[in-house]
Image (tube, coloured by chain):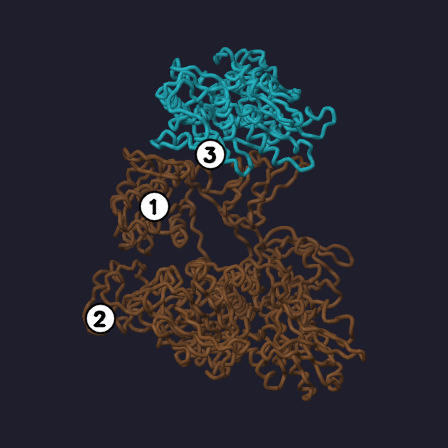
Amino acid sequence: MKITDEQIAYCMECGVCTGSCPVARHYEEFSPRSIIKQLLIDREDVVTRDRIIWRCVTCARCSIRCPALIDIPQIVNRCRSEARKAGYYPEPSHHGVFHIIPRLQLRDFLQDRVGWASQWRVRRQGEYFYFVGCAPYFSSMFRYLQIRPLNISRAILTLLNAVGIEPVVSNREVCCGHDALWTGEEETFVKLAQKNVEAIRRSGAEVVIFSCPEGYITFKHHYTEALGKLPFQVIYASEFFMERIDLLKRLLSRDGEELERVTYHDPCRLGRLEGIYDSPRILLDAVPGVERMEMERSRENALCCGTSAWIECSSCSKSIQFDRLEEASDTMALDGSEEGGILITSCPKCYIHLNCARAALPEDRVAKKLQIEDIYVFLARHVTEIQDK
Amino acid sequence: MSSHLIGAVTVIGGGISGIQAALDLANSGFKVYLIESDPSVGGVMAKLDKTFPTNDCSSCMMGPKLVELANHPNIEIFAYSELASVSGEPGRFEVTIRKKARYVDEEKCVGCGICATKCPTKVLDEFNFNLRYRKAIYVPFPQAVPLIYTIDQKHCRMFTKGKCGICQKICHKKAIDYDQKDLFVTVPSGAIILAGGYSPFNPRVMEELGYGRWPNVITAIEYERISSAAGPFEGHILRPSDREEPQSIAWIQCVGSRDLMNGVEYCSSVCCMYATKQAMVTKEHDLSVDTTIFYIDMRAHGKGFDAFIDRAKSEYGVRYVRSRVSRIVPDVSGKRLEVTYVTEDQKFVTEPFDMIVLSIGLCPNPTAIDAANILGLSVTPHGFIETDQFHLTRTSRPGVFVCGAIQEPKDIPDSVQQGSSAAEEAMAFLAPARNTMVPVPTQIPERNVLGEEPRIGVFVCHCGINIAGVVDVKAVAEYAATLPNVVYAVNCMFACSSDQQMEIKRVIEEYKLNRLVVASCTPRTHEPLFRNTLKEAGLNPYLFEQANIREHVAWVHQQEPERATQKAKEVVRMSVARARLLEPLYDSSYEVSQRGLVIGGGLAGLTAAQEISRQGFEVILVEKTDSLGGIAKHIYQTESGFPVAQYTQELIQAVESDPRIRIFLNSEVAEIKGACGRFTAIIRTPWGNESAHVGAIIVATGGTEFKPSEYLYGQHDSVVTQLSLEKIINSEPEKIKEAMHLVMIQCVGSREPRRLYCSRICCTMAIKNALRCKEINPSLNITILYRDIRTFGFRERYYREARIKGIRFVRYELGSKPQVVVDSRGTLSVQLRDPITGMLLSLPTDLLVLTAAIRPQEDQKELAERLRLPLDEHGFFLEAHIKLRPLDFTVPGFFICGLAHGPKFSYESVVQAKGAVARAVSILSRKRMFSDAMVTTVDPFLCRGCGECEKACSFGAIKVIDRRTEGKGIRAEVDPALCTGCGACNVACPTGAASLAHFRDKHILAMIESLTGDFEGETRELDIRGLNVTTT
């Protein structure tokens, strides 16, 4: 999808975008259709001189359904750059910690980002590079929710080691720049991209593995756009493990536990923006004793986790999240089961947001019983130790 | 009449009690002249290290009060001054104050301290009890208010030798004036409050204790300075003789208290607790130090005190020995001190200690007694101020009131509440003259800076040499000038001096500044000054930002001036970054309902209602039962003979006929809505609900006598409680006449493991009733079985009198309570073992009197939940701060007095009730309440109603409210009147919906980013786990 004025002009004001929009559903003033319309009538200033442009969650539910193939998230993003230039900033959630960290990473700080990985077999140089992403920061920030997103990275190392891979993890890695890119900070984004590419190049890696969908699409598409062809391949973890499914299947086991009922939540970056829907599901199905159910809104129709790029988390976000949790809960309780089940996602941010919402759910709601788990943590939980063999 | 009253009050004494009185008066529309004989205010509390029972830092606690005092527009402080004479009559006194010559011009001195650093003369420092030196020009302590230097004429070379003059040469402000003379100032005052405080007992007269002879025998107040971080040993507990750490310390109680031999009959009330605190603090410094307290009776009669002692024993291992030490001498090595004492079972023990602390008593302050003589006040034989029997703040002279330790030895909370109480008496006396002597703030039109590009002015302060001695202030100013949006930057000697304020205003005008940054000291003390300067310059006062390059830079980096200068630049850069984003803020205000609500119609409630009315305000009195008077109707007289019940009856009549008081009997407060100054109370009356608008609420719901469940109470007719005995004495005295034996058991229901509190009044009450019984029947055998006798303060004299009259006292331990037995003829006797003789006693008794505990009202918990007020662990109402806010609830606009707060004497309830009124009147006397602009606001879109803010708020100021029925969502809402602007909710809020003006994420992030913005080529390696931060 290329963004051109022409493409906007194709808009037939059908309103499927606004109708599909999870934000508009809860916040009437927000409408993708109006945004497009404003742009069409050359009132870009109305869009960019207002905080409204920051309220989009860029989930692409609109664009994937747009009959005119308008890439609304990209248009929103372009407007955001303009808005920022005009001095209209988003409201950072969590006090802007996640926006200032990348900016600070551009200074000459060298952080210890990999101390936690010492229990696994990792390297400084090698063929595979595991891009850890923000999980270490998330783990610190979200202690109040009693969750440890860094366990996702730990699980990835367990899985990689299990399939015989000793990846590089690096102190020189910085933020992928996804959020900078999506909040109109192009300059920051480009600098981060350069730092990452350089760090990976110096490690000698040929393949970079991502567990975070955002990092993956940012590298795959936006790095290439900004810096040209990358000196390495990028691959998303579920795809990577899919390629080794036979080996993995031999390691996956279940020792006497009860069956687990799961449902998979498609992250927007991995799903709608990248089209990876199947490999996570295949991996889940490979675990013995898993009963996987499908939510009504899944794959292309999946519902957003409520917020994106750590901005404008709001009452809308909460409504969206509650909606999603109820859906997951209802799906897994179709036969009247009271167990709650496991809502599985493959994006650390979805994981955090859904957990946050569940914490805020009233005690008497059935969805409160849901477990929320990252796919790799779930898989690693079922991997038998084979290192001895 | 009113035209003749003067709306100003002179407060003599600047200790905590006087400070409280001054603040309450000033906040209620009265001009205050505060006289302090020392160079600075603060009194004894400023010298203390920590205070019990919370072990908080004393001067830190006091700091905010001192700052408020120093900056209050209605208070004029005359420090280093004394009362010279008083003329006129009550309501129209002329008070002449002698301002002693400081030889320093108060108008010019800015307290920079250069003079003291250069002064060549060292003098023993009396503030630190001569344990270290100060200079001949000095301030007593660094946080002194007022911060003005004083020349010690006795030691200054200019006065002793006629030459030197260094301070005069070096003072940039030309403040030194060797020819200064005492100055006499006369101020008009409607009333006078004497808050003269105490001076410590001089233990030299007790030679057996060796004070003054053995250097390691010190007084408790000296020990406060020794353990204080700001003291002579910088917080290390060392022996004065050899500066070594003592491994064992003993405290000797009752030195100069309860000791007629040395002319002191009374108990000093506070020593048991401060010794316990000091032992605990010692253990906190070093757990291995042995701490022993030698005592007679452990007097832990205040709120939370028994639990505190229990903690000292069980958690800290403080040893308590019930014995008065007989001798202290050095051991053979001469290094340690041998303490000789006798144990309860008659064993002689000689035990060595490294250091001895004498728990010295409280004596009247001689300066205060001088003032009392000038005022013509009656003084007690012990030299304290004589007061009305029941109204303890009223002196023998109308219009002159008293508070604090000069009235009777007392601890900090009692001094604070008495300070409020004396202020209330003065205000009530002068009510018609309220607001006649206080300045009316002038309004200066404010320049609109919205839409202007930031134009920032930066003033970098030398603070004499405090900053400039370390930091290159000129370089900092030059650097500041290069920062974006800075249009003016300069360094100046004292940013806070009054001529500099003129200069700042001129610069604002000339350079059209719209933001001001001052790089100097702490905003805690100086922000109000600079904000005011902005206001006078026609700018919104919130367009100000202060960078602290003194405490945060110069003082902590004295050894590395270059890096300090670099840091100062960075600190200024951060402040400029933030200043750029400052916006004008406006305080909001609302109208006050100038009417009080008193809940509870007992003695405290009646007093509160009457006093609010005397202050000129309407009041609503709500009483749950069908009659007023409460438990006071059953107290026939106090230990001094004051007829409480009769007084209460008269008070009821007065209240009932007061046109400003509306009484609701058989009624309860069902709900309170709104906030401080504009509450709506829903009162449930027999005829339905009524609602009333009130500005302040006093909770005086009282307490009740515990109904015992032991000692055959309720099973045998001759087992009664003290209240019943009091009734018998007054209505059936023949029963006492006929009796031969009477036994009283103390602490029934008090000081038990689950009720670990003392009911405070029981010892005195038992002794009072025992003495009355003896009056009626002199041959009656009375035995009082007790655990510790707690007749604190002047009540000690009744204990002595009881012993003189032949009343017997036998002690028992909690583990071996007396046994009550009934023989076949139904006669009662009590059996216990006397710990001193070891004998098993069997005491026959005609009447067994149980001194039952005071409990909170049974429905207190329900009431607390209804009004959302906090209770302590025993179910009494919990005050906002146990030391300094004993009459306030944490919830603004609510005040507490009487038994609902904790056990106390009837006259103490009266003191508290009046004090609570003083606190309430500081609200009721305002037409409008102003709420600070520094309060949290909630963005309704961003708010997800998660409730994290509500969990974080300590003030109940932010709540998630479901407004779905009104077509809105579930959102957090802030009550600006309750919000203190602490920012806790901002931190908790994940979305940024809750934010505090000028402390928004953007301000903080701008500072963080600007900090890391410029490293001049340095590379730093930062370990996020904080393990190894290195600089390369």
Instruction: Name the residue beneath numbered marker 1.
Output: B508
Which quadrant is the C terminus of chain B positioned in? Answer: top left
Going by the numbered disc 2, the residue's amino acid type is: Met
Asked if residue B427 can be seen in this view, the reply is no
Residue at 56% over, 50% down: B955
The residue lying toward the viewer, choosing from A205 and B72, is A205
Instruction: Name the residue beneath numbered marker 2.
Output: B158
Percent position of residue B286, x then y: 42, 59
Judged by depth in the image, the label closer to the viewer, 2 or 3, is: 3
Q: Earlier in the sequence, mark 2 or mark 1?
A: 2
Relative to B749, is A179 on the left or the right? left
Q: Is residue B288 above or below residue A227?
A: below
Element carrying mark 1: helix
Q: Is residue A389 above or below residue A105?
A: above
Chain letter, colour cyan in render: A
Percent position of residue A89, x then y: 46, 30
Instruction: Name the residue beneath numbered marker 3.
Output: A96
Disc number at residue B898? none
Res B626 → quadrant: bottom right
Going by the numbered disc 3, the residue's amino acid type is: Gly
| Residue at the bottom extreme, as displayed | B779
Residue at 66% over, 21% down: A291
Element carrying mark 2: helix
| Residue at the right extreme, as displayed | B825
Residue at 41% over, 60% down: B70
Which quadrant is the N terminus of chain B positioned in? Answer: bottom right
Residue at 58% over, 25% down: A382
Going by the numbered disc 1, the residue's amino acid type is: Ile
